[in-house]
Amino acid sequence: MKQSGILLHISSLCTEYGIGDLGQAAYQFADYLKRKKHSFWQILPLNFCGYGDSPYNPISAFAWNPYLISPDLLVSDKLLEEAELKRLPYSQMVDYNKVYHTKDIMLRSAARNYLNSHNINAYIEANAWHLKPFLCFYILRQRFGHGKWSSWPYRYRTYSENLYQELAAEAELLEAAALQAIFEDQLLRLKEYLYSLGIKLIGDIPLYLSYESAEVWAHQELFDLDQNGQRLSIAGVPPDAFSASGQLWGNPIYLWDKLQESGFELFERRFEHILKYIDLLRLDHFIGYVNYWKVPCLATQMPETAENGSWVRAVPEAFFDKICGRFGTERFIAEDLGILNQDVCQIRDSLGLPGMIILQFCFAESVPDVQSFPADRFIYTGTHDNNTTLGWWQELPPNSPSRLNLSIFCKRFLLQHGLPNDSNINEIMIDVAWLSGCERMIFPLQDILGLDDDARMNIPSTALGNWQWRMDQECLNRLFQ
């Protein structure tokens, strides 16, 4: 039996606080999914965002994004007074600076109230491996600015338990810990509500970490850095469908031999952490777990493109033996987009991990036999990295192969919506997904609503101006009418 779901990040929900959150709007959207008989809600990473407000460039592999905490739930939990709520005028794009300024005031008040009634030190100790380094890193970023940690005073350039003890009594550190506990409570309640509706939550985990992250700072031995903590190489991908010059991400490269020596503890703990709260986990950039694109760099000069990198093999057999031996394989989805070689496909298939098919890519060369697509793949009309389906269609030249092949496909299968045009292209691509051999389908909400490129979530290889779109009242009216 086929199953479907919607891709919509928490930040894109419609609230009165400038950004989506884990409160009422999330529960309303869960009800919508149930009413429309969807089985999945897919979200993006929930990590504390770093540069560019990107969930794929987090300042911690573990710490949650406190700006997704619901102020309304803080009031109902008696952690905030109604009079303390600070609402923002509605805008369809998240203004992160305004959100940070406004929600910081509410979150600090709620955190102080939480500390008055909870044993935060017990929570910190229970999560010490990842939480103590993050709390120290967070405080030091406030103290020394958000520049390179490698330029901080020498004694603060890496984590130690002594450093934690030095900073442990600082009010901001304890408040940051309280917000992590509050986030987990709100997320767990939403997860339990979804479970009661029979809806599975699909989460996402970035392969790479930001250079400006707690884990790179605290575990420098696991990354390709020089003795001063400067990057010797950075991550990206070679030229592909998203970028003619490749994508240069800037993340430090893992030293996979060192990860293996540690028993892959960093990743094992990451998976354990997130799998408490979600049902299925999308392994972002799965290709990089098998072989990765390594771009050399100098501390004083970063490369301008990713073209001069090289493929390097990781240690996928040892890695997945450990991870799948601990967690099984049935909870993972391989984001296997990009340059797939035989090695990547063999690892994916030997593990039985479902991969992904993106329909926007399928018509570029021929009329695809979608009914023969593998049943175990997750099929998408597009992802957060693609344009919306309407935006994609409108950008295609009039005589492009994708336009011609899709029209041939529609004539061949006599789709109920007729030939593709600006008013029905999203419905047609959803129909194509249903016709495919894939048993599970995920549709970005923008494609359900037929929105154009103004609703695009991310443009790969651009650092700023992304992750901003969210629903407006018109979207809500169309969903709940």
Image (cartoon, helix red, strand yellow):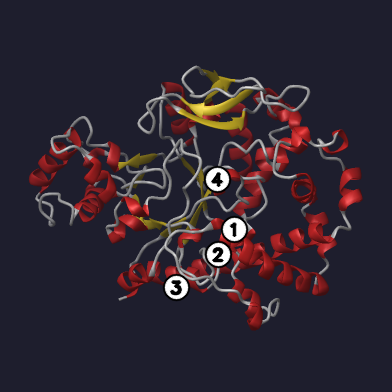
Indicate whether 88 appears above or below 338: below
Residue type indicated by callout 2? Lys
Give coordinates of residue 461: x percent, y percent: 46, 35
Residue 277, label in figure: 1
* Left or right, 51 with reference to 182: left
Mark closer to the observer (4, 1):
4
Give coordinates of residue 90: x percent, y percent: 46, 69
- Judged from the image, the secondary structure of the residue bearing numbered disc 3 is helix
Give coordinates of residue 110: x percent, y percent: 71, 71
Q: Residues within 10 Å of mark 3 (few under 14, many from 20)?
A: some
- Judged from the image, the secondary structure of the residue bearing numbered disc 2 is helix
Asked whether the beta carbons under mark 2 and mark 1 sit within 8 Å of each other, the answer is yes
C-alpha separation, residue under disc 4 versus residue under disc 1: 25 Å
**370 or 328: which is nearer to us?**
370
C-alpha separation, residue under disc 3 versus residue under disc 4: 29 Å
Residue 28, label in figure: 3
Name which of mark 1 and mark 3 comes first in the sequence.
3
Residue bearing the label numbered 2: 191
The C terminus lies in which quarter of the figure? bottom left
Residue 52, label in figure: 4
Indicate whether 332 appears above or below 16: above
C-alpha separation, residue under disc 2 versus residue under disc 4: 28 Å
Residue type indicated by callout 1? Tyr
Task: Count up the numbered dots.
Answer: 4
